[in-house]
Image (spheres, helix red, strand yellow):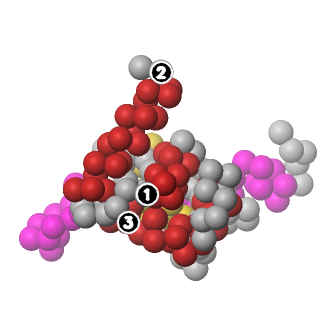
Amino acid sequence: MTTSNLEQGSIQSASERLRRAGYRVTQQRLAVYAFLHGSESHPTVEEIHAAVRDVCPRISVATVYKSVESLVDVGLMKPIYLGHAATRYEASSEEHAHFRCIACNQIMDVPMNKTPVVGGELDQCEIIGSSVEFYGFCTRCRRHKLGLAPD
């Protein structure tokens, strides 16, 4: 399957999920999804807006917010909450943690081999997701902090 076919299949699947959930399938929603699906970054709504304006020049920030909300609702995007910073989003379906550099705010995916076993009081709860965040200094910021030359 070519990249184009893979992308087209993904867009078709996204369209079906939106329809099943009662959302209209719009060019704007699909542009937001396509950008995030093809991105390895973890953009804010404002960054998504800037990126999709190439495809949808008249798209507003409010429309991007509504598109993101619907895509999160149907499980095609996940929000990443990082304290007081702006919420970021991703389209990855694989379980993973995140590393956030406290100096430059870069976010990196961290693979997780298995889901931790929870018990006790949580035995009677319905867990629908989890969020693991590591934080510290990325390689570049750590080298800068230590006064070392950049790589």
Per the model, the C-alpha gap separating discs 2 and 1 is 24 Å
Q: Is residue 141 magenta?
A: yes
Closest to the observer, 149 or 59: 59
Region in magenta? 116-145
- Residue indicated by mark 3: 70
Q: Callout 1: 10 Å neighbours few (<14), some, many (20+)?
A: few
The residue sitting at 41% across, 42% down in the picture is 11
Q: Amino acid at mark 3?
A: Ser
Q: Using the image, determine if residue 1 lies above or below residue 48.
A: above
Q: Is residue 136 magenta?
A: yes
Please indicate, yes or no, whether residue 36 appears anywhere in the rendered image.
Answer: no
- Residue indicated by mark 2: 2
- Residue indicated by mark 1: 26
Q: Secondary structure at mark 3?
A: helix
Closest to the observer, 78 or 140: 78
Q: Amino acid at mark 1?
A: Thr
* Between discs 1 and 3, the one toward the N terminus: 1
